[in-house]
Amino acid sequence: MFRLEILLVIALLLFARSANAGDVSAERGESLIARKGCGACHSTDGSARQGPTFRGLFGAKRTVTTGGASREVTADRDYLTRAMRDPDADVVAGFPRGTMPKYPLVDDEIASITLAIEKLAAPAAEPAHRGSTTPLFVSAAAFTGLHLLLSSIPVRRRLIAALSQRGFAGVYSLLVAAAFAGMIFGYVKAPYVEVWLPPRGMRWMPLLVMPFAILLMVAGFSTRGPTTVGGEALASQESASLGVFSITRHPALWGFALWGMSHTLANGELRAVVLFLAVLTLALVGMVHIDRRRAAELGEAWTKYQERTSLVPFAAIMGGRAELDLRGIGWARFAAAIVIYVGVLHTHHLVIGASPLP
Ligand code: HEC
């Protein structure tokens, strides 16, 4: 059941990117200008400080010194981007060289600041209304809640009795798809709201965690076991506690949990936090849920299986109930995980709009 949802969440991220150009927005730019202390040298009201004011800067003519020669330029996006990337390339006439610090800003931050500066050129043109985060909250709660409600044993049993197995599957998919469509809508409509500004070092978190998360997902999806759909009968087989199952009996869901956790920590933006917390919650609660259902369905066989494996990664190994079986995972899965990781690193920026590098 989870496989479909995973594809849906990935599609959401792709869609949100194309519909909303990632997290590039004037609101984020304003917040960055405030947080990075640009205001110490750049006013937004036209007054002079150590550096030129941002008011009326966009589209204005500047006289700058480039490599010792004076020239006239228009303050367009390219110019502003250059001014932030390499402050000493063009030095504004009347201001000292070497005063403006070189900030380690990534592309989407620079683009957001540029938008904020653009806004200061035409203050009246900006519509006052801002989006709301409510649709995203409601649909994320529905997406998570529906999964848990519909797969709880009593609800499931009753619905299957009333609707037949196929009818139940249809209703399940329809409701989850509706909540999912709500999430897309809510994500795209949500305004930029900063919950916190993660320290730059936090950007290392997903970089370091994702190789393991991807390996767990790859191994989890390509290995049949008692916790996967239709794998109940495997519980009593020896192979069910080997390979990746020697680490945890819920490898794929742990992959999602690690993805959600590392990305929640690295993103201070509200809509991303809501999305990744939904992934994290669904993954963690999903594990407990599957365990309960299997216990009810399989009885003794499941109890024995639980003794040989653990929900928490490495817990069975540390408790002396299992032995780490890396060989059983197989080199092909390690190789596939590395290829996927490198691929995601290279396409993350294009697809999601945010650079994955610290
Ligand atoms: C310590 C003072 C200082 C801080 C802090 C500072 N700047 Fe500057 N900035 C300057 C000075 C001085 C200039 C003009 C000289 C030059 O072009 O290097 C300048 C120029 C610029 C320009 C070109 C402006 C123009 O009129 O053409 C931009 C854009 C800019 N800064 C953006 C930023 C941003 C964004 C930040 C915060 C992330 C920032 N600055 C922080 C001092 C500062």
Image: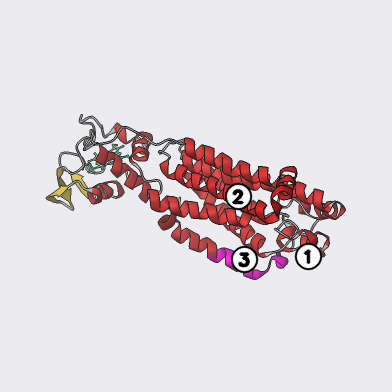
**Above or below 179: residue 339:** below
Residues drawn in magenta:
326-339
Decide if residue 312 is in sight here.
no
Q: Would you say residue 327 sits in the magenta stretch?
A: yes
Looking at this view, name the residue that lies furthest to the bottom: 332
Q: Residues within 10 Å of mark 3 (few under 14, many from 20)?
A: some
Q: Residue at x 69, y 64 (%)?
A: 223
Q: Of label 3 and label 1, which has the lower sequence position?
A: 1
Q: Nearer the viewer, mark 3 or mark 1?
A: 1
Q: Is residue 56 above or below residue 258?
A: above
Q: How is the image coloured?
A: secondary structure
**Label 3 sits on residue:** 334
Residue 245 visible (yes or no):
yes
The secondary structure type at the circle numbered 2 is helix
Disc 1, SS: helix
Pointer 1 residue = 239
Q: Quadrant of residue 113?
A: top left
Give the image location of residue 11, x and y in percent.
49, 55
Q: Alpha-carbon neighbours of circle 1 within 10 Å: few (<14), some, or many (≥20)?
A: some
Q: Position of residue 38 (x, y in %)?
A: 31, 36
Residue type at the position of mark 3: Phe
Query: Which numbered disc flags the more N-terminal residue, 2 or 1?
Result: 1
Q: Quadrant of ligand 1?
A: top left
- Marks 2 and 1, Cα distance to the nearest angstrom? 25 Å
Residue at x 60% of width, y 45% of height: 280
